[in-house]
């Protein structure tokens, strides 16, 4: 815990906004420290944590998660950490990793879950769809996952999200996951969304979505 707090001290001393610590990190730290998630989050808030990335969501369906990222938290556990963060006054983003082995119905349930959380808390700052980056993913190499979404699929995800997530102010395009060679549809779509992001290292989308 002291290590995480020292990071926040450095960021805040530099006058920067601390957007740090995923739900998975918070969940793991709470287990390691044998403390409630809410207590960990309150200490982070007091130490200057400004917001959290809503990564590790992948697809919020445990049938998918058991194959895609079995070492990660369950869908309900992700939701519990995020809602606890919002109640503590820490806003988060929300993400969805798609284009691997999920079905349209599972994507829809994912969107419904984050929409319901937003209705309860209003704590999501934006929704960030992420297309599965397959190149180095063992689950793809074992022929158990698709090689990410097509450009048309990306457009459909953004279009449906814009309609369904009517309680989200922002939908963001990830530069890393979406704007790649051969995806001209998303490059055009980018200009109709809020500014894109992507100065980060891909995690489960590119390396840990491995089913093992």
Image (tube, grey):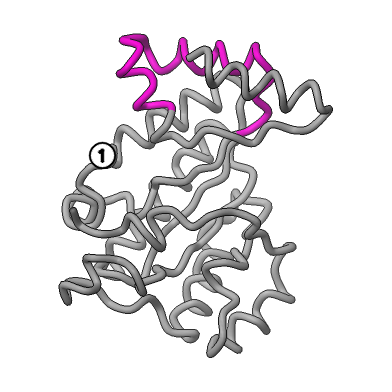
Percent position of residue 172, x then y? 63, 60
> Which of these two is toward me, 67 or 171?
67
> Which of these two is toward me, 154 or 183?
183
What's drawn in magenta, residue-wise? 26-51
Q: Decide whether residue 197 is among the magenta residues.
A: no
Is 108 on the left or on the right of 159, as rendered? left
Is 91 on the left or on the right of 55, as rendered? right
Above or below, 113 relative to 140: above
Q: Decide whether residue 47 is among the magenta residues.
A: yes
Percent position of residue 142, x then y? 16, 72
Is 18 on the left or on the right of 210, as rendered? right
> Which of these two is toward me, 58 or 166?
58
Above or below, 46 relative to 7: above
User: Which SS class for mark 1?
Assistant: loop
Q: How many marks?
A: 1
Name of the residue lying farthest toward the right: 15
Is 76 on the left or on the right of 97, as rendered? left
Q: Which residue occupies 83% across, 28% down? A: 15
Dividing the picture into quadrants, the one containing residue 56 is top left
Above or below, 42 relative to 26: above
Dot 1, how many residues are within 10 Å of its Cα: few (below 14), some (14-19), or many (20+)? Answer: many
Percent position of residue 35, x then y? 36, 9
Q: Which residue occupies 48% across, 63% down? A: 130
Prevailing secondary structure of the magenta residues: helix
Percent position of residue 1, x then y? 48, 14
> Which of these two is toward me, 189 or 177?
177
Above or below, 211 relative to 113: below
Q: Which residue is mark 1?
A: 74
Dividing the picture into quadrants, the one containing residue 31 is top left
Q: Which residue occupies 40% across, 63% down? A: 206
Q: Which residue occupies 47% across, 86% down? A: 152
């Amino acid at each position: 815990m002291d290590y995480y707090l020292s990071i926040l001290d450095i960021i805040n001393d530099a006058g920067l906004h601390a957007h740090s610590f995923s739900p998975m990190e918070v969940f793991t730290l709470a287990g390691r420290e044998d403390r409630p998630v809410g207590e960990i989050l309150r200490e982070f808030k007091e130490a200057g944590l400004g917001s959290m990335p809503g990564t590790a969501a992948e697809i919020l369906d445990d049938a998918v998660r058991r194959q895609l990222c079995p070492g990660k938290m369950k869908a309900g556990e992700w939701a519990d950490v995020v809602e606890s963060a919002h109640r503590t006054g820490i806003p988060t983003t929300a993400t969805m990793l798609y284009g691997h082995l999920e079905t349209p119905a599972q994507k829809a349930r994912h969107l419904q879950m984050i929409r319901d959380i937003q209705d309860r808390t209003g704590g999501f700052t934006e929704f960030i769809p992420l297309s599965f980056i397959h190149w180095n993913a063992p689950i793809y190499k074992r022929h158990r996952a698709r090689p990410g979404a097509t450009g048309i699929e990306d457009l459909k995800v953004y279009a449906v999200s814009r309609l369904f997530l009517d309680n989200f102010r922002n939908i963001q395009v990830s530069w890393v996951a979406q704007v790649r060679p051969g995806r001209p549809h998303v490059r055009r779509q980018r200009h109709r969304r809020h500014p894109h992001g992507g100065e980060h290292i891909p995690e489960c989308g590119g390396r840990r979505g491995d089913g093992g």
